[in-house]
Amino acid sequence: MQTVFVTGGTGFMGRSVILQLLHRGYTVRALARHGSEHKLPYGCQVIAGSALDKDSYASQVAPAETFLQLIGVSHPNPSKGDQFRAVDLKSGLSAVDAARAAGVQHFVYVSVAQPAPIMKSYIAVRAEVEKNIRESGLNATILRPGYVLGPGRRWPLLLKPAYWLMERIPGTRDSAQRLGLVTLEQMVAALVHAVECPAQGIRILEVAEIRGKSVNCNRGDRPAANGK
């Protein structure tokens, strides 16, 4: 099977994705800072380095065909603008450079639903990385969830009745659907789908598509394990 390089593999989303990829037979090379190696799932190849310094890991990306960029400031909120630029932006731009230099065939990036009335600094950083991906010439899948529900991230469930109502009002339907909640399980399935069905050019997966993605590709979409 193919090799996937993962940044952010020690996070709640990254660990789940790595486990699924390993289960499906992929070789996973996962970046981790010194001292965080134990947080990675057993079975992946640990690559020591910093996501903020591409020179610390760029030479270890190959022979990965797919680069999965999952780095992000935990529990984002409007007060973390400086952290978004220092971590999310820097790691995103570094990942694009490292993937391009390694000849990666497909880049997968978790962005955020946009436009939105709040979290403007967060969205601006993610949009800047998206722009850099387009300019890089890489084939890429960009996922744009609204908010990902997961361990310690359940409070938005209180908003579900409001989302349900807004999706049924013509004037707010589009915004509610674009900025909707997705579960960790839905994100993992969509990310695995992106790996197994690499894009040609740039593919955007909005909330509705993330919710509907499974790990199965249409006939002829999934590349053969032997590359033929």
Image (spheres, grey):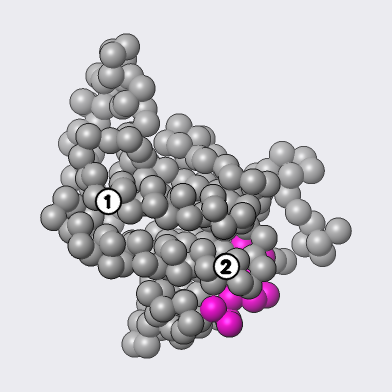
Position of residue 145 measured from the top left corner of the image (x, y, whole percent): 38, 43
Asked if the stretch drawn in magenta spans residue 114, the answer is: no
| Foreground of the two, 110 or 22 | 110
**Crowdedness near tag 1: few (<14), some (14–19) or many (≥20) residues, C-alpha within 10 Å:** many
For residue 179, side relative to residue 132 (left or right): left
Residue at the left extreme of this rendering: 79
Residue that lies at the very extreme toward the bottom in this rendered image? 34
Question: Does the image show residue 68?
Answer: yes
Q: Secondary structure at mark 2?
A: helix
> Does residue 43 appear in this view?
no
The picture places residue 143, in percent across and down from the top left corner, at 47, 46
The quarter of the picture where the C terminus appears is bottom right
Residues under labels 1 and 2: Cα distance?
Answer: 23 Å
Per the rendered image, the range of residues in magenta is: 58-66
Q: Is residue 128 left or right of residue 57?
A: left
Residue in the image at 74% along x and 44% along y: 221
Say which quarter of the image contains residue 102. Answer: bottom right
Q: Is 219 rendered above or below residue 81?
A: above
Q: Are marks 1 and 2 in contact (CB under 8 Å)?
A: no
Q: Which residue is mark 1?
A: 122
Q: Which mark is residue 99?
A: 2
Dot 1: element: helix
Residue 184 image position (x, y, % from top left): 39, 50
Of all residues, the one furthest to the top in this rendering is 170
Q: Earlier in the sequence, mark 1 or mark 2?
A: 2
Q: Which quadrant does the N terminus fall into?
A: bottom right
User: Relative to the observer, which residue lies in front, 103 or 170?
Assistant: 103
